[in-house]
Every structure is written in C-alpha cells, then in structure tokens.
Amino acid sequence: MKSKFNKNWNASKQPRKQRKFLANAPNHILRKLMASTLDKPLRTKYGRRSIEVRKGDEVKIMIGKFKKKQGKVGKVDVKNTRLQVDGVQRSKTGGEKIETWFHPSKVKIISLNESDKRRLKSGKKITELKKAEVKTETKRVESSARSTPPAAGAKK
C-alpha cells in the first residue's frame, strides 16, 4: 500500500484505510478534524453545528472523569488531534499534577474566541444566504399564487 496522502481518496468502510488516511493526512485536513460541537445558543447565532477548536475558546467537557468541568482551551495539538483545558489536571502516582489531553469530540464549545474575524465569516455568509433564499422563495410562491389562472374545468 502506498504511504503518501491521496487527494482523490473518497471514503472506505475498511478501518485500515481510514487509519491510513488519518496517519498520512496533511495539516490543513487534520485541522478540520479538530472540530467540536457548539452549544445551542451558539448554533442558532452562527447557523452551524460545529466549528474548529482554537486556543482561547471556552469548552465544557462532556464525557469521562472530568465531565461537566469548564475551562479555556490552553493548547491545541493538531498533529495528535487533542487539546488541553486550563485548570483540568490529573495527578500521577507520585502526586505530581499534569494537564490532561482531550479529544475535540469529547468537549462542547460554550463561548468562542472571537479575536479572529475571518473565523466565522463563512458561516455567517451561509446563514445570510439561506435567509435571503427563503425570502425570495416566499415572494415567488405568493406572486405565483396570485397570478395563476383558474383551472380549465372550473366554473365561474
């Protein structure tokens, strides 16, 4: 099997091919895999279900020993698909405390770090376009309902 990343790879049910895809994927694709779900108010605000996690985002841990704990994202490791939450530490057998790593699928984003304006630009455009399409469709339906002639067999 080839070890290079194939741009034309579509999908496969085979776990070995999925692992190969992830192991050989370039950083711009691995970055997209660092997405986490958004909290419900953020979903309605931005019109998206998930977004890539960045340093400075506030997250809530959903699964595991630290469930329901909240904190800011301290580090993001794109290569290993994991992140650290500030203040969430585990203790080693010697008593030493170390930061814990989490997979982005195990956390939910509560508030976003909005210092980068380009981060949410595409999501807002999509929702604005959808709203505009809905408005134009309702106008078309209303105008077509008014201008339709009576049916061929209908009596006056």
Image (cartoon, helix red, strand yellow):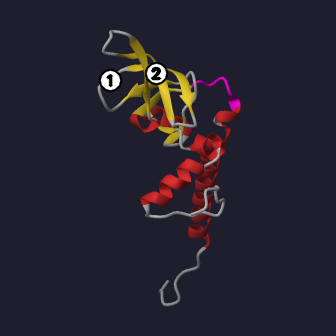
Within 10 Å of disc 2 (Cα), the crowding (few <14, some 14-19, many 20+) is many
Q: Which mark is residue 66?
A: 1
Residue at 29% of width from left, 25% of height from top? 65
Q: Which mark is residue 143?
A: none
The magenta segment is 113-117
Query: Is the residue 81 above or below the residue 126 in the image?
Result: above
Q: Position of residue 135 (x, y in %)?
A: 60, 53
Question: Which amino acid type corresponds to the residue marked 1 in the rendered image?
Answer: Phe
Question: Which amino acid type corresponds to the residue marked 2 in the rendered image?
Answer: Val
Q: Which type of secondary structure does the marked residue at label 1 adopt?
A: loop
Q: Residue furthest right?
A: 118
Q: Quadrant of residue 97?
A: top left
Q: Is residue 116 within the magenta segment?
A: yes
Q: Position of residue 44 (x, y in %)?
A: 49, 38
Q: Residue furthest top?
A: 95
Query: Is the residue 133 above or below the residue 44 in the image?
Result: below
Q: Is residue 139 within the magenta segment?
A: no
Q: Is residue 23 left or right of residue 69?
A: right
